[in-house]
Every structure is written in structure tokens, then in C-alpha cells.
Image (cartoon, grey):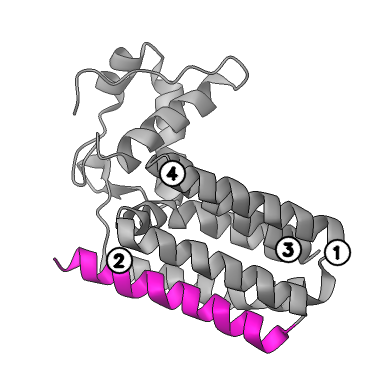
Amino acid sequence: MPDNLKLAINDYLPLRDVVFITLRQAILKGELEPGERLMEIRLATMLGVSRTPIREAIRKLELEGLVKMIPRRGAEVAGISEKSLRDVLEVRRSLEELAMDLAVQRMNEEQMKLLEEAQAEFVEALSTNDLIRIAQADENFHSVIYDGTGNEKLIQMLNNLRDQMYRYRLEYIKDVGKRQILKVEHERMMESLKKRDRDLAKRIAREHIDNQEITIMTNLNM
């Protein structure tokens, strides 16, 4: 465990959320490595908080698949397994196809404009080489599409799944060559939505997830 882990600075969020964000970022950035134990007392001392927000954060991280509980050992950072990736992507593939199908039928002109703005922000993020910013911009792009479905239950399911996908998303965009592919895929998504082509939209969504699965699986087996 790193000795220099520091609490994220945020004056607007409750302490428990700040602790959660701090630990989440440390895991995603590799500062807390797979297999590393998350000892509540040590983390609480390091971050200058009580054990309660640490415990709450660990519970939330477990729900995201970033932490696993080991009997008689406690919490530790979860590794990235092929099975967990496949499980998540199988669900996401189907939900993304449904989202694109509904968005084609329901997105209005204002939402289309928001999507174009989100894509411009994504392109700008690509130039920074900041993985966290690129991942956030990618999420924002997809969020506009989700909102365009007008289906609150679907949006909720996709947002929950998005949290579980975040680690894999970062793993994918570490590959610099894949970032331009993402850019092109986003453009194809926008084109299919503007054309109101349901079959094309669903096919692009499926290919988008397939490409991620192939790349991440390859990286995991390297």
C-alpha cells in the first residue's frame, strides 16, 4: 500500500463520498494493486478519517467489482479476470443495442446537438493523453445516448453497469491506437442516429463492444 495516499479535495461532497472517490481513483490508477489488502485502520490513519467512511467506501467498491472480500482475510483489490469481463460485456452488449435502437426512434434535435458537443469534448480529451479525462468524456458521450432513450429503467441499469465497466474502459484506452477507433465509432453512432437507421445503429453498438472485448482480452493475456 502506498504511504503517500492522500484524500481527494472536494468541499461539496460528503466525506464518505470523498473517501470512496479517493480509493477508487487509487485502484483505477494502479496505486492500489490487485491482491493488495485494504486494511481499514491503516487507510483511516493515512487519510485522516474514521474507519466508518473507509468501511462504507470498501462496500461500494465491492459492488463495482473493484474490491473482493476474502474469508478470514478481509478486503483486497480485485484483479481483472476474463470471466468478469465477459459477464459484464455480455450484459452491456445487449443493453447498448437496445439503447441505440430506442435512441434512434426518440432522440430530438436538442439531444443530437448535445451528442455533437459531447463528441467534441471527447476529441479534445484525446489530445490531453489524460486517461481519466478521456474515460470521462467517453462516458459522457454514451450518457447523452442513454438519456435519449427516454427509458429511466434502462438508463439506471446502464449507469450501474457503467461503474463496473470503468476499469475495463481505462484498460481499453491505455492502448493509444484504439483511441482513434473510438473516435470513429462515436462518429458512426451519431451518423446512424441522424439517419434514424435502427439496424445500423444496433450493429455499430454491437461492434463497439466486440472491439473492446477483443482488445482487453488480448491485453489480459499478454
Query: Mark 3 highlights which residue?
Result: 153
Q: Quadrant of residue 169?
A: bottom left
- Secondary element type, mark 1: loop
Could you give the CA–CA distance between mark 4 and mark 3, rounded to whole angstroms? 35 Å
Whole-percent x, y for residue 9 in the image = 48, 17
Residue 188 placement, left or right of 174: right
Query: Mark 1 highlights which residue?
Result: 108
Q: Are marks 4 and 2 in contact (CB under 8 Å)?
A: no
Q: Earlier in the sequence, mark 3 or mark 2?
A: 3
Magenta residue span: 197-222
| Residue 36, above or below 40 | below
Query: Mark 4 highlights which residue?
Result: 127
Using the rendered image of the protein, determine whether residue 90 is visible from the camera's viewpoint.
no
Q: Are marks 2 and 1 in contact (CB under 8 Å)?
A: no
Whole-percent x, y for residue 110 in the image = 84, 55
Q: How many residues crowd mark 3 within 10 Å: few (<14), some (14–19), many (20+)?
A: few
Is residue 205 within the magenta segment?
Answer: yes
Query: Mark 2 highlights which residue?
Result: 216
Q: Residue at x 67, y 73 (%)?
A: 191
Amino acid type of the residue tagged 1 in the rendering: Asn
Main secondary structure found in the magenta portion: helix
Could you give the CA–CA distance between mark 3 and mark 2, rounded to whole angstroms? 28 Å
- Secondary element type, mark 2: helix
Front position among marks 2 and 1: 1
Front position among marks 4 and 2: 4
Of the pair 75 and 168, the residue shown nearer to us: 168
Of the pair 119 and 146, the residue shown nearer to us: 119
